[in-house]
Image (cartoon, helix red, strand yellow):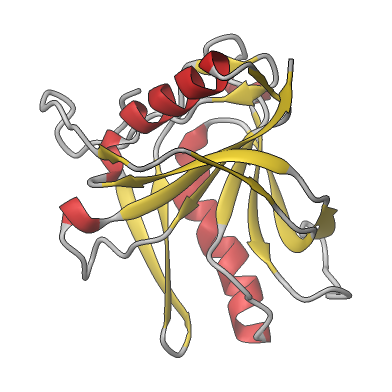
Amino acid sequence: MIRILRWVVFTIVPGVVLLSASGWLSTACAQDAAKPDAPSADPSAPIQNSVGEILTDSTSAVTVLVLPMRGNYDQHGEGITKLMSYAGPRGIVRDMPFALYYNSPANTPADSLRWDLCVPVPTGTPAEPPFVVREMPPMFVAEVICTGPYGGVTACYDALSAWIEKNGYAIDGPCMEQWLGNPSTMPAEKLESRISFPIRKK
């Protein structure tokens, strides 16, 4: 995946810095899950990220504040700004934000793409439109930490997808990507993102 990137960095509460990638995604990794494109400042330069150990985990239910998104993925920066500008001043942010991708531009027109920008919040948090609060159920997931420039996450998606297939699992929901680093203060080679898929045995 290839995309031009603008990194938007947010300081929403003291000591907490959040970020978002703005760009577009491509390549389906499951019928109802999208495989995000890698942002790249220089699309002609190959980028190889470090693929961490692929693990399975049983997650707990989590309450999230959601900004439903429709259309082209180049709205990432604008969407994260809107989400965190709402959540940050209210003091309700409990973890780093993430995205859920429900379909792929490989087989979906850009204006029909469905995706959500999410941030964990306390149970019982109210929301005003266009925001909604949802309860994400417990899930069994396969996940990997991708280390290196955010433009190199394609290798991590490929490795995770291959592992899922090789080990007899099927993807059971939208892919999730959580951004864990701050490119304005960290060397590119140390940036991390967590990529995960809900899975089930075939």
Which image quarter holds the N terminus? top left
Q: In this view of the protein, which residue sits in the foreground, 47 or 196?
A: 196
Q: Is residue 104 above or below residue 20?
A: above
Please name the residue shown 57% across and 25% down the image: 34
Residue extending furthest toward the bottom: 14
Picture coordinates of residue 24, whole percent (x, y):
43, 31
Q: In this view of the protein, which residue sits in the foreground, 107 or 186?
A: 186
Please name the residue shown 41% across and 60% down the image: 180
Picture coordinates of residue 60, whole percent (x, y):
76, 58
Residue 105 visible: no
Picture coordinates of residue 75, whole percent (x, y):
50, 43
Q: Is residue 180 above or below residue 163?
A: below
Q: Is residue 48 above or below residue 9?
A: above
Residue 5 visible: yes
Q: Quadrant of residue 198?
A: top right
Left or right, 128 with respect to 18, comes to right
Q: In this view of the protein, which residue sits in the foreground, 142 or 179?
A: 142
Left or right, 197 with respect to 189, comes to right
